[in-house]
Every structure is written in structure tokens, then in C-alpha cells.
Amino acid sequence: MTTTIQKVAMIFGIGFILTAISGFIVPGGMGMESDPAMAGKALGLFPVNLLHNVVHLLFGIWGLAASRSFSGSVAYTKIAGVIYAVLIVAGFFAPTGLGLIPLGGNDPWLHIALALPLLFFGFTAKADTVTTTTTV
């Protein structure tokens, strides 16, 4: 039986993989520009580069792998949520990701939209319980 948290991990995993694919195909998405103003833009809004897209792909694969178990899904959503919360701050204070990944521009707003549900589901997940009754 698939729990809600497993579905959440799967949805985020698929979403990150689709994001990576779209990032790879945008103009500039295969380059290494870290300045958000100069980097390729996924959906015309979100700055990306090759390393950024690889990170999205890894988060996607991790989400799909984690979705196979309750504990894996809880760990994925908590850890990914914390990482994206850190990336929110980094996007405002280090928008070039130390010269590696464009984190500024519209990315902090997207990272808020990712961190909040990941943290919510991760820290409120409860294992589905099945109760059985026996008659004597």
C-alpha cells in the first residue's frame, strides 16, 4: 500500500526530473553561466545551467527511489525541504551560488514553493495504520 508521503515523494521526483529535462533543452541550459541574469531560463523565468539541471535530475531520481518506502519518503521530504530552505537564503545572499549555480532571480520564490510542502509533508507524515478485528 502506498502512503501519502510516498505519493508526495514520487510527485516531487517526477517533477524534478521533468524540470531537469526542460532545463537541459532551453537555450543556455547546457552552459555553465552562474549569473541569474545571463543564465538560460527554464519556462522563461527560472535561471538554470548544466550543474543546476544535474542537481534537479538527482533530486528527481532520489525522490523516485525514496518513494518506494515510507521511511525513505519521510527522509527525502525532510532533507530536501531543509536543503531548499537553505537555497532560499542562498538565492538572496549568494545569487550566483558561489559561481557554480544560478540561485537568484526568480529561483528563491520557487524554492519557497518547494520547501514549504516538502517540510510540511515530511514533518507531519504518519504511517497509515490498518486495524483488524477478530471475533472469537
Image (cartoon, rainbow, N blue to C red):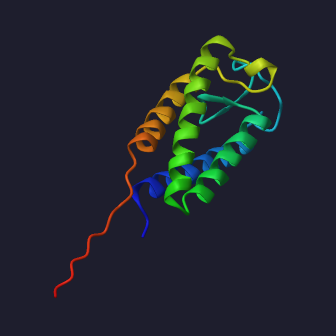
Residue 127 image point, x, y percent: 39, 57
Does residue 43 appear to the left or right of 3 in the view shown? right
Asked whether 125 or 17 is in front, the reply is 125
Position of 92 relative to 123 (above/below): above
Does residue 31 appear to the left or right of 17 in the view shown? right
Asked whether 117 or 101 is in front, the reply is 117
Position of 64 relative to 33 (above/below): below
* Residue sitting farthest toward the bottom: 136
Position of 43 relative to 7 (above/below): above
Position of 105 relative to 18 (above/below): above
Measuring 46% from the left and 43% from the top, which residue is drawn there?
Answer: 122
Residue 6 image point, x, y percent: 48, 57
Where, by quadrant of the figure, is residue 54 drawn?
A: top right
* Residue sitting farthest toward the left: 136
Does residue 13 appear to the left or right of 6 in the view shown? right
Does residue 80 appear to the left or right of 134 in the view shown? right
* Residue sitting farthest toward the right: 32
* Residue sitting farthest toward the front: 136
How many badges with numbers are in the image?
0
The image quadrant where one finds the N terminus is bottom left
Where, by quadrant of the figure, is residue 96 drawn?
A: top right
Where, by quadrant of the figure, is residue 134 drawn?
A: bottom left
Measuring 61% from the left and 50% from the top, which residue is drawn there?
Answer: 18
Measuring 58% from the left and 39% from the top, which residue is drawn there?
Answer: 80
Residue 124 image point, x, y percent: 38, 43
Residue 63 image point, x, y percent: 59, 52
The image quadrant where one finds the C terminus is bottom left
